[in-house]
Image (cartoon, rainbow, N blue to C red):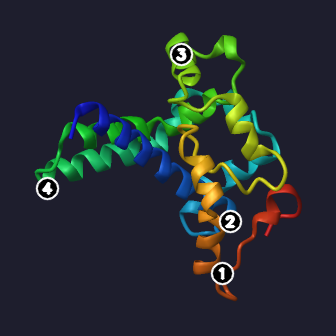
Amino acid sequence: MSILLKLVLVLLLVDLVSGVVHWAEDTFWTTDTPVLGPVLVAPNLLHHDEPAAFARFSYWHSNGQLLKVAAALLAGAALLGHLTWPVALFALIGGHANQIHKWAHVARRKVPLPVRWLQRAHLLQSVAHHNRHHGGERNTHYCTVTPLLNPLLDRLGVWRGLERLLATPANSPRRTDLWGARA
């Protein structure tokens, strides 16, 4: 497999993971979810109430949790003898998924020039693409890194299919709390 293909596959895998986590935050998890509620769900709900809110946070505030997960992934891969450049790239991009997401909420003039080029090349998400998540019922375009997977996953009905698969009477989707009363 070529290096370029591996690069693209790593980027798409990070994007898919970002989408699954974002979908779970928006769909099932609440602020009462153990550990994840206060760390992930509460800031996500603030972000949906005020989309530009987290753009005001510092680099460390925006990326610290993901960078810790990335460091743990790298350490685990190293301990298991599986630390490869694709794993390191996955950790690097994944550790900065919130920063990439943040750039989709920042005025274009404040986005670093190389990032603007990657957004124009459709390798990183642009403001226009990400705004589709914040419109309507906010139940599409969950992936936050690239604009590549969202149209495909939405067209295939992946998110609604996962909801039907995972929903139980005790664990029903709660997306409506994104634009009104909290669950």
Q: Secondary structure at mark 2?
A: helix
Residue at image coords 54%, 57%: 21
Type of residue at label 1?
A: Asn
Residue at image coords 70%, 53%: 140
In the displayed structure, would residue 3 be above or below residue 138? above
- Residue 117 horizontal/vertical position (percent): 53, 16
Q: Which residue is mark 2?
A: 27
Does residue 96 appear to the left or right of 106 in the view shown? left
Q: Which residue is mark 3?
A: 117
Type of residue at label 4?
A: Leu
In the displayed structure, would residue 111 be above or below residue 127? above
The local crowd at label 4, few if under 14, some if 14 to 19, many if 20 or more residues have their Cα within 10 Å, is few
Q: Secondary structure at mark 3?
A: helix
Q: Which one is nearer the viewer's eye here, 156 or 137?
A: 156
Q: Quadrant of the N terminus?
A: top left
Name the N-terminal-most of marks 4 and 3. Answer: 4
Q: Secondary structure at mark 1?
A: loop
State the separation of the CA atoms marked 4 and 3: 37 Å
Kindly indicate the quadrant of the structure image that contains residue 90.
Answer: top left
The local crowd at label 3, few if under 14, some if 14 to 19, many if 20 or more residues have their Cα within 10 Å, is few
Type of residue at label 2?
A: Thr
Q: Which residue is mark 1?
A: 171
State the separation of the CA atoms marked 4 and 1: 35 Å
What mark, if any, has residue 80 been given in the picture? 4
